[in-house]
Image (spheres, rainbow, N blue to C red):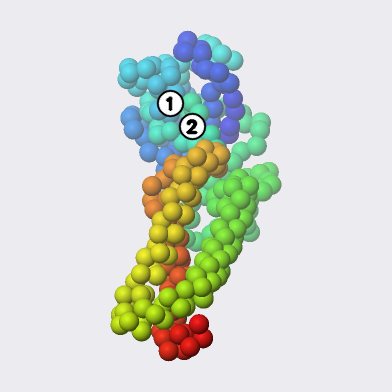
Amino acid sequence: MSESRRGAMAGATPIPGGVLANVVSPEFFRTFTIPLVKGRAFTERDGAAAPRVGVINERMARIAFGDSDPIGRSFNFRATPKEQIEIVGVARDVRHNPRETASPAVYTPLGQGGEIKDLMTVAVRAAGDRVVSAESFRTEIQGVSPDLVVTRQRTFGEQVRALLVRERTLALLSAWFGLLAVVLACVGLYGVMSHQVTQRQQEIGIRLALGADTSTLLVAMLRETAMVAAIGIAIGTAAALGLSKLISDLLFDVPARDPLTFAAAAGVLAITTLLAGYLPARRASRVDPTTVLRSS
């Protein structure tokens, strides 16, 4: 369970925009698989009668305490300056929005949060891949308190997909346009190679009549195709490197100039180009020299 609000830490380094403060239950960190790098998580003993405690994330620790160990140090919110909160743990940074970096965050236990007047988010982790049905979820909530009302229920995957609608749409359109570009490139290369074969039929016939090996002609024509592919890949790679910054804001945990992505794209284009040039080259290597010489 968690309740989100915004606040700022008194007696610490001023933070533009405030600190993300969450009131959470003891199982919050385990439910969301957020590891603690120092100290401990909350327990059921952290109630209203217990000393006030809190957990901060790594960015908050760097901003407020620098290289010092924050465990055992105290802070307070400006809204309640007399309430000193002891830091008992440091959690790993978590991005609440994939488009943004992790915000400085403070977590306080639900048992010490007082009366909750706002909406509360309840997270449920099911065993295995089982999805909790809406009806069973509402039944469990009503069992806790008949006054509680479930206003909306979504899986974590649904929330991520809703958040990344723009990026998913652009990725899908880019994939289709990329596939179309590859198909058009294949058709264009095949047409160019076929035209070259037609223009060089007499030359090919003379070479075959003089005893040129079929495989040698095939390799020679494929070499020309490979040269075209190399020039095109070099120009395309240079253009992609120059324009990569335009899509950097749409990528998450992937660099805009990812070497593996560039290598995969170059490999696909190289194979496509060679396949597109192989058929006309194979047809040219099997031409009948007598027929070609008679028609010339």
Instruction: Give the residue type at disc 1.
Output: Arg
Towards the viewer: 161 or 285: 285
Q: On screen, 120 above or below 233?
A: above
**Disc 1 element:** helix
Residue on which disc 2 sits: 102
**Residue located at (53% from left, 67% from top):** 192
Mark 1 burial class by Cα count in 10 Å: few <14, some 14-19, many 20+:
some
Tag 2 and tag 1, C-beta contact below 8 Å? yes
Q: Which mark is residue 46?
A: none
**Residue located at (52% from left, 38% from top):** 245
Instruction: Give the residue type at disc 2.
Output: Ala
Towards the viewer: 131 or 225: 225
Q: Please state the horizontal and vertical placement of residue 4, each as a whole percent of the image.
A: 58, 32
**Residue located at (62% from left, 31% from top):** 116
Q: On screen, 145 above or below 284?
A: above
Q: Is residue 252 visible?
A: no
- Quarter of image, res 191: bottom right
Q: Please state the horizontal and vertical placement of residue 38, each as a whole percent of the image.
A: 33, 30
Mark 2 burial class by Cα count in 10 Å: few <14, some 14-19, many 20+:
some
Q: On screen, 230 above or below 277?
A: above
**Residue located at (32% from left, 17% from top):** 68
Q: Give the alpha-carbon distance from disc 2 to disc 1, as whole Å.
A: 7 Å
Q: Is residue 198 visible?
A: yes
Q: Left or right? Give the position of 182 relative to 92.
A: right
Q: Which mark is residue 59?
A: 1
Q: Please state the horizontal and vertical placement of residue 212, each as a whole percent of the image.
A: 31, 79
Q: On screen, 99 above or below 149?
A: above
